[in-house]
Amino acid sequence: MKTSNLIEVLAQDAPVRSSLSHMLQQATIAAALIVAVTFFSAVGFRPDIETAMDTGRFLFKFVITIALAVTGSLVMYRIGRPGVPLLGWAWALLVPWALAAGAAVFELSVTPPEIWMSLMIGHNSRFCLTIIPSLSAGPLACFLVALRHGVPARPGIAGAAAGLASAGIAATFYAANCNDDSPLFVLLWYPIAISVVTGIGALAGHKLLRL
């Protein structure tokens, strides 16, 4: 490619990146606000929230979900831009699940085997599988609209990243309502709910984000 052609391509690409970055920032703010309003109007905190905040297991749920929301968002920000390497950030997506797995191993080491199954099944699995996808709908729509201002080379993967980021935000709010604090519960049911949203995002991205 000639130097003049390269400069022209870069000049055309710069406004796209700037516009996409701005749109994703606005979408992230809108997504958080939508989830917050929906959560506090329809779900709310668990009744024993003040007591729960004194326990490590409750607080560690937020370490996992916030890590997921952040890494998912960072991948989404990058994947909407053509030619941006993703391998390092893709590996970063393993961090939240590594944290969850480590917490689950610790849980197994400090609890008797006879209660492992009850801790894993918990009391609110159906609610978890319903609320996380429901809270994710608004953020996912915001992110898909924003990604249409970019030129993702892999629209399905871009949509999946949007779904993952949306589910991470939704799971962070849901964790404040969920009274199943065991890492065993989190490691089983949260990924199922998050995978549903990620899959929906992938399908929507494949349909809506094509050039």
Image: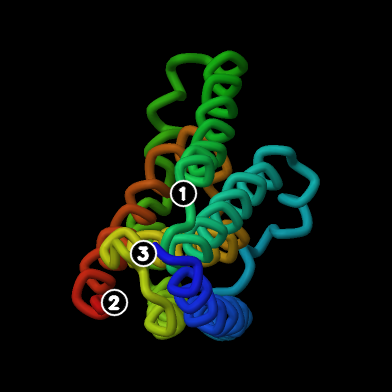
Tell me the residue that label 3 is attached to: 158
Secondary structure under the numbered disc 1 in the rendered image: loop
Q: Of marks 3 and 1, which one's residue comes earlier in the chain?
A: 1
Tell me the residue that label 2 is attached to: 209
* Frontmost residue, 61 versus 12: 12
Q: Are marks 3 and 2 in contact (CB under 8 Å)?
A: yes
Tell me the residue that label 1 is attached to: 86
Q: Position of residue 113 (x, y in %)?
A: 46, 15
Residue type at mark 3 is Ala
* Frontmost residue, 159 versus 14: 14
Secondary structure under the numbered disc 3 in the rendered image: helix
Give the Cα distance between marks 3 and 2. 8 Å
Residue type at mark 1 is Leu
For residue 129, what is the image quadrant? bottom left
Q: Of marks 1 and 2, which one's residue comes earlier in the chain?
A: 1
Q: Position of residue 47 (x, y in %)?
A: 65, 64
For residue 196, what is the image quadrant? bottom left
Residue placed at 60% from the left, 20% from the top? 106
* Frontmost residue, 91 versus 191: 91
Please state which of the two labelled residues, at mark 3 or mark 1, is closer to the viewer. 1
